[in-house]
Image (cartoon, coloured by chain):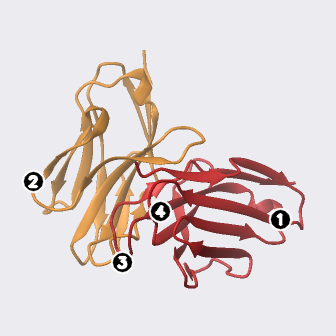
Chain colours: A red, B orange
Amino acid sequence: GAVVSQHPSWVICKSGTSVKIECRSLDFQATTMFWYRQFPKQSLMLMATSNEGSKATYEQGVEKDKFLINHASLTLSTLTVTSAHPEDSSFYICSAAHSVGNYEQYFGPGTRLTVT
Amino acid sequence: AQSVTQLDSQVPVFEEAPVELRCNYSSSVSVYLFWYVQYPNQGLQLLLKYLSGSTLVKGINGFEAEFNKSQTSFHLRKPSVHISDTAEYFCAVSANTNAGKSTFGDGTTLTVKP
């Protein structure tokens, strides 16, 4: 149980276009989902926390207008990178938790974004 | 706020040897502690967690970790490693008052050599 999927697993897009990444909890309802960014050989950086039905909470330094997060249902959250640039190229990972404050996160397999 | 320091960025070890990956944390409140493993181009998999109770925690794949409150450490150990243990390992901490939000260390690359 507790499987989280991400789609797509990798994507290449041109500079200036927007890209949407989906994160789904397949066998449980996720009240809270987290979005992370990981640069090569580095740790995970929390970008934002999203709770179903409410606006996402962004970490300091993360542009909310550039990284649009929507958590419209208990099984789906999306991250849209708007007007992508090469510096947005990264590995994006989502995780899901059963409830707000629940310590256990279940991670998706990640999405590799390359902006050319 | 919490912080995590993984003391070794890379740990090379021979197959069947023991290994210890070191993790220190800092927090002004009580914490939960986690170790995750990440294989190339994949997400994170939980190895083990400390929430409360016994300070020796056993996880999957033969790993264990010991919570030491006085030294604010949570080192990961395995008595005999396999080639398949080669991966990136992350230590993470969260405040027990905001358990869902974790802070991750920079990671330790474990390379097991034949």
Residue B66 in percent (x, y) is at: 18, 49
Q: Is residue A79 left or right of residue B18?
A: right
Please report, as a chain letter, where disc 2 is located: B
* Labels 4 and 1: the sequence-earlier one: 1
A41 is higher (above) or lower (below) than B101: above
Q: Is residue A110 above or below residue B18?
A: below
In three-dimensional space, the C-alpha distance between marks 3 and 4, rounded to whole angstroms, equals 22 Å
Q: Are marks 3 and 1 on the same chain?
A: no
Instruction: Identify the disc placed on residue A85.
Output: 1
Q: Which residue is mark 2?
A: B54
**Dot 4 lies on which element?**
strand
**Same subunit: marks 3 and 4:** no
- The residues bearing labels 4 and 1 have C-alpha atoms spaced at a distance of 27 Å
- Which SS class for mark 1? loop
- Residue B76 percent location from the top left of the image: 27, 43
**Structural crowding at the residue carrying mark 3, measured as other residues with C-alpha within 10 Å and reported as few (<14), some (14–19) or many (≥20):** few
Distance between mark 1 and mark 2 Cα atoms: 48 Å
Front position among marks 4 and 1 = 4
Amino acid type indicated by mark 1: His
In the image: residue B29, left or right of residue A8: left
Q: Given the image, what chain letter belongs to the residue carrying mark 3?
A: B
* 2 and 3 marks in contact (CB < 8 Å): no
**Residue B1: mark:** 3
Chain identifier of the residue bearing label 1 in the image: A
Q: Label 2 amino acid?
A: Ser
At x 81%, y 60%, the residue is A86
Residue A112 is left or right of residue B34, and the answer is: right
- Residue B13 lies, in percent from the top left, at 37, 26
